[in-house]
Image (cartoon, grey):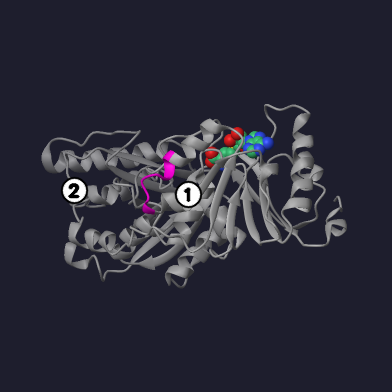
């Protein structure tokens, strides 16, 4: 299989979270990929295994990179087994590798949506038994090889999940707080905001620093997954370590100076320490300013600042949450003139307490929480104009 890795064209599906399909497509366009098809929580494209390696390393907005190995129509449950049994599994991976079958099923053909995954698992183990009289182990939590099954009504697709563990497991973040943001969500919010990677970036509620780290990685051009070692494609029989090393070694990762100021702050000193520790492996870590302070101590002095932030949503704060958001609104109007501020929050009432006019809003999810990601433009000399409540 190896000789085909750089020229045989594959159907590649990159999965992402709800609401970020356009954002992921924009990232892929920036990489130079064309003919992108937007799906529900995914973007599909054509490419080679070289692209698959590249995307696993470079995409900040994808959760996983799948390569299609079979697509077929089914009439009844057992068709899944029959078709999966025709796939040459022993050519894809060695019997010593563990595997798992995961995926999603939206079909009236199946009463139990887990059952089709079991059928594919049986087809794989039976194929190995037929060939070697033995079978590979199933390992659910961190398999060497991950197979993806997607069924929508009578259409089934079997893919290899070439990432394995989801790509938000970047391996640079060692410490988190109570409500850490998922790294892929952070990267998607930054891209969705349209930050130009030149204007000063600030997260005044930075917690363990996820938005700050992802902003610095984006601005420096260092892939967010540069620290990650595990990729399931390394466990396939077609793995080409030379090809992977050529892609990995092409990355310039010793960048010390960022193209702009990147700042984070948090009232909690423990979180400040965690945020600093999370970026200390990067050469640019000294260029990122992370300070312990109340948000209202930060002043822009009329310099343009681009703020993306994830303040508390109020689960543990009772009525004080509306006061906090009102104070954030006042701080933006009085101390952050000439700035753009994007806020992600699940608390609609609290967002109204900001007393600012929303110029763009997007529905997104932070974990299981439905959130609004809103843009506020704070102009100099127009404090009155800002004082509009929705
Ligand atoms: C939802 S968490 C942010 C999580 C962060 N995005 C991450 O990935 O870890 C909100 C943060 O706001 C901080 N915070 C609460 N009140 C604050 C205030 N008045 N000024 C600055 N930070 C504050 C908390 O300490 C907490 O770390």
Q: Residue at x 68, y 51 (%)?
A: 299
Of helix, strand and loop, which one carries label 2? helix
**Which mark sits nearer the N-terminus, 1 or 2?**
2
Q: Quadrant of ligand 1?
A: top right
Mark 2 crowd level (few <14, some 14–19, many ≥20, 10 Å Cα): some
Where residue 3 appears, x then y in whole percent? 17, 67
Badge nearest the viewer, 1 or 2: 1
Q: Residue at x 77, y 41 (%)?
A: 327
Task: Compare residues 326 and 255 and report the one nearer the observer.
Answer: 255
Distance of label 1 from label 2 (alpha carbons): 41 Å
Q: Is residue 292 above or below residue 298?
A: above
Q: Residue furthest left?
A: 132
Q: Which residue is mark 1?
A: 213
280 in the magenta segment: yes
Q: Is residue 309 shown to the viewer in this render?
A: yes
Of helix, strand and loop, which one carries label 1? helix
Where residue 137 appears, x then y in whole percent? 23, 33
Image quarter for residue 339? bottom right
Q: Which residue is mark 2?
A: 90
Where residue 315 appears, x then y in whole percent? 68, 29
Is 59 positioned to the left or the right of 350 in the image?
left
């Amino acid at each position: 299989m190896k000789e085909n890795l750089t020229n045989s064209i594959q159907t590649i599906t990159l999965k992402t979270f709800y609401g970020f399909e356009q954002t992921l497509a924009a990232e892929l366009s920036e990489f130079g990929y064309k003919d992108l098809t937007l799906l529900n929580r995914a973007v599909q494209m054509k490419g080679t295994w070289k692209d698959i390696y590249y995307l696993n390393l470079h995409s900040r907005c994808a959760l996983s990179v799948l390569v299609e190995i079979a697509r077929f129509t089914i009439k009844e449950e057992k068709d899944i087994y029959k078709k999966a049994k025709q796939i040459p599994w022993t050519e894809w991976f060695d019997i010593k590798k563990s595997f798992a079958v995961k995926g999603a099923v939206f079909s009236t053909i199946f009463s139990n949506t887990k059952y089709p995954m079991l059928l594919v698992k049986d087809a794989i183990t039976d194929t190995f038994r037929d060939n070697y009289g033995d079978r590979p182990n199933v390992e659910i939590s961190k398999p060497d090889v991950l197979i993806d099954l997607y069924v929508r009504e009578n259409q089934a697709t079997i893919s290899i999940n070439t990432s394995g563990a989801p790509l938000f497991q970047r391996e640079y973040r060692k410490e988190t707080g109570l409500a850490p943001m998922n790294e892929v969500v952070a990267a998607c919010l930054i891209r969705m905001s349209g930050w130009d990677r030149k204007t000063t970036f600030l997260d005044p509620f930075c917690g363990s620093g996820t938005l700050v780290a992802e902003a610095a990685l984006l601005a420096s051009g260092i892939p967010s997954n540069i620290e990650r070692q595990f990729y399931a494609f390394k466990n396939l029989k077609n793995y080409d370590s030379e090809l992977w090393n050529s892609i990995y070694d092409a990355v310039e990762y010793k960048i010390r100076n960022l193209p702009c100021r990147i700042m984070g702050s948090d009232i909690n000193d423990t979180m400040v320490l965690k945020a600093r520790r999370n970026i200390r492996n990067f050469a640019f870590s000294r260029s990122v300013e992370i300070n312990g302070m109340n948000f209202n101590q930060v002043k822009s002095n009329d310099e343009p600042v681009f703020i993306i932030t994830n303040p508390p949503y109020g689960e543990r704060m009772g009525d004080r949450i509306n006061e906090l958001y009102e104070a954030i609104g006042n701080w933006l109007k009085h101390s952050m003139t000439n700035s753009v501020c994007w806020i992600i929050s699940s608390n609609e009432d609290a967002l109204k307490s900001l007393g600012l006019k929303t110029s763009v809003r997007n529905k997104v999810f932070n974990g299981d929480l439905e959130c609004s990601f809103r843009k506020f433009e704070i102009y100099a000399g127009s404090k009155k104009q800002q004082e509009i409540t929705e």
